[in-house]
Amino acid sequence: MRLSFSLPFIHFIAIFKPYKLDINHQTLKTSITFLMAYNPSSCSCFHHSFCLLFMIFSFPHFFLTKAQAAGHCRTSCGTIPISYPFGIDDGCGSPYYRHILVCSDSGFLELRTPSGRYQVRSISYSDPHMIVTDPFMWSCQDGHHFRATRPFSLDTSTHLTLSSQNDYLFFNCSEERVIVQPKPIFCERFPDRCDSTCDSASYLCRHLPGCATALGGSSCCSYLPKATESLRLMLKYCASYASIYWRTGVNAPDDQVPEYGIRVDFDIPVTTDCLQCQDMKKGGGSCGFDTQSQSFLCLCNQRSNVTTYCNGMLVFKPFHLHS
């Protein structure tokens, strides 16, 4: 048997809850069967809007997508707020950062990268960046006893980047493999090779944050890797390394204070759809996406998902069923 029909466009006023339709063949067959069992003459009423309304409001669970509603999107993990573009529940935030952040069972926010999972210490949305901690890096407690370490890396396909405000210190490097020299002097003599120098006279090597004398005579030099591969190469010939970022001090905006950690910068994708969704005059929804197609969804507090904004109109697009 071949059954084919089209449902017309129907617009509802904003007083109805806006649902995004996700109708498949089996769903419609189930609805038709139920209607016919309820009233054998029901199959003749598909040309009337009453039957369409009956189907929709009698079986709303058939039409909801699997994407998260705003009430299901957690807004924090531990003490760290979670806002757009991030989400720790699938379907929340921007698909660019899908599965990037994880809220652990112990309540700690973690960043997932190709080199492992790292605890997130803080997130700033006004100056978009996060600070993460790498337990494999050298710390003051290690002193001159260097542990086996591995280089921190980011997935280059994401919208995350290592901040230029990071400085990297390397300890006990092989001078046969690495150019360990005071950088200003070396750059005057070999300007063409200046970028490959690990500066042994850097400010941070002489003023290690929080533990100036912790190295106990072990060598230190400062080098800025241009990519993850250069970081791996340095660690082949150095005992360990540490990342230090410069945070803004409390006394003045230009007061920079060095601290151990890795600053990771991120982009906040801004679209007209997302701005309309977040507009409080239009319902104040949360920006999300369909977990299957990754297309935009506005997540509303009524546990419904729409493609525009929460106070928008509900639109049913025509569809065809063939069997």
Image (spheres, helix red, strand yellow):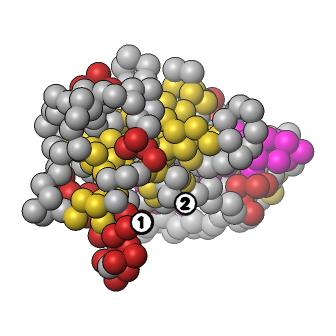
Looking at the image, can residue 139 be seen?
yes
Q: Is residue 8 magenta?
A: no
How many numbered discs sit on the rendered protein?
2
- Horizontal side of residue 12 vs 90, given as left or right: right
| Residue lying at 54% horizontally and 33% vertically, measured from the top left | 122
| Residue lying at 34% horizontally and 78% vertically, measured from the top left | 189
- Horizontal side of residue 150 vs 17, given as left or right: left
Q: Which residue is mark 1?
A: 184
Looking at the image, can residue 86 be seen?
no
Q: Which residue is mark 2?
A: 295
Tell me which segment is drawn in magenta: 277-300
Residue 183 percent coordinates (x, y): 37, 63
- Horizontal side of residue 82 vs 218, given as left or right: right
Label 1 is placed on what type of residue?
Pro
Quadrant (top left, top right, bottom left, bottom right) of the N terminus = bottom left
In this view, the mark in front (2 or 1): 1
Badge 1 local density, few (<14 within 10 Å), some, or many (20+)?
some
The quarter of the displayed image where residue 75 is located = top right
Cα gap from disc 2 to disc 1, whole angstroms: 52 Å
